[in-house]
Amino acid sequence: MTMTKPRVLQLVDSFNQGGSERQAVQLARLLHESGDYEVRVACLDGRGVLRAEVESLGVGKIAEFPLTSFHDANFAIQIRRFVRYLRQQEISIVQSSDFYTNIFGMLGARLARVPVRIAARRESGKRSAFKRQIERGAYRLAQAVIANCEALREELIAEGVPERKVITSYNGLDLKRFTPRQDSRRDELLASFGLSQLTGRPLVTMVANLRPVKDQATFLRAARQVHRSNPDTAFCLAGEGELLEALREQSAQLGLAEHIFFPGRCERVADLLAVSDVGVLSSASEGFSNAIIEYMAAALPVVATDVGGAREAIVEGETGFLIPAGDAELLASRVKELLNDSAQARSMGKRARCIVEEKFSTAALFERTQLLYDRLLPARLTISGPRSGVYGSEIERVSR
């Protein structure tokens, strides 16, 4: 018997163009469009380019709970506001998306007696002892903790989160946004980026914020080696961040100033990848990289550092190559191999696209999410009987 639709709150830190924010906004859209849920979105910081996308969904006013610290009077004020909001809106599920929303969201949801509380771990990396302690407290208040790759699931269990609580749910990608390269459109797209000078030249691209953890310095050292043997190759570092000027300076010192391009924040990632030949990620640390599956969706062969969940997406030698973090020489070697063997590169790209369709699509993400909600919701709030699917057995352990 069909019951009242559960009301789901997606809680995001901000609407900036980050991986966690993008996934939360995308999930809000999927849930809303399914017609099975009433969706609400709340944030700790209302700024960011993704806000307009949420507002266009028609899911109601975005609630904002601005934080300045976990230690001041404002935190208590915002928690009280949040609890009142959850009760007034009769929220059935609160799903947080990162460190700060885990802490704020799980505490507020518990105080408001929200039936289902779902936290997340989407990135790896060391935290201070204090942050680890309060995050463990947030996980204790949650009934489930989503890890977006097996590597992070194992990390959570090693930190003491009960295995039964932790579920792997990979990021989902809207495949309609990404199409394999079409040479007939390449010149037109290059011109739209102001890069007409790259017509006829292969392009090696990395999409990532310009932060130390992404290690674009290794990308640039590899680019110099590639350029020596393949002088027609051009390189692109798309993203924004505090390292922009330092990376520009490094590229000039390496003699690459005329061959590497910094387009800044790219809101047309799909078009950029459609004019690229190889996708690279040189990160020193990752959770599960959205950039990797975007490269794969665009049918690009990938060369990425073997960190976080990279090997859960890339099949070594079939869809790309995995290399140790910081190894510029091997990175250059693998890129050159792909540039010099176009048949191999095309084959890898086609296989990569197939894997994304099978494993990392928005359809797969929605199925996993719906199964999880069904397992955790009280019977009176479940909109249908138990579902079956590819992910059912994995999610079942959360409700035991």
Image (tube, rainbow, N blue to C red):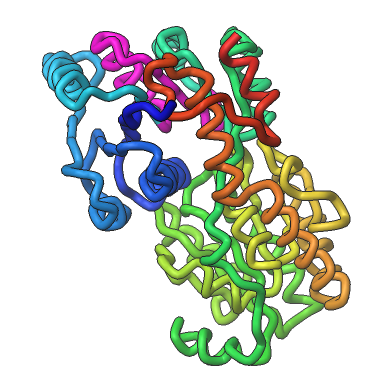
Of 256 and 135, which appears nearest the observer?
135
**Residue drawn at (67%, 63%) of the image:** 279
Q: Residue at x 29, y 51 (%)?
A: 54
In the rendered image, the residue lying farthest to the front is: 1
For this view, does 203 lie left or right of residue 120? right
Q: Position of residue 280 (x, y in %)?
A: 67, 59
Which quadrant of the structure image shows residue 59? top left
Residue 85 place in picture, x, y as percent: 16, 24
Residue 309 visible at all: yes
Within the image, what quadrant is residue 97 found in? top left
- Confirm whether the magenta stretch covers residue 65: no
Q: Nearer the viewer, residue 23 or 94?
A: 94
Which residue: 34% across, 28% down?
Answer: 6
Assess whether residue 99 is covered by the magenta stretch.
yes
Image quarter for residue 106?
A: top left
Viewer-side residue, 369 vs 321: 369
Name the foreground residue: 280 vs 79.
79
Up-down relation of residue 129 to residue 48 (above or below): above
- The image position of residue 241, as x and y in percent, is 40, 53
Answer with left or right where residue 361 lies relative to residue 105: right
Q: Which range of residues does the magenta coloring cover?
A: 97-126
Residue beneath the point at 62% across and 46% down: 283
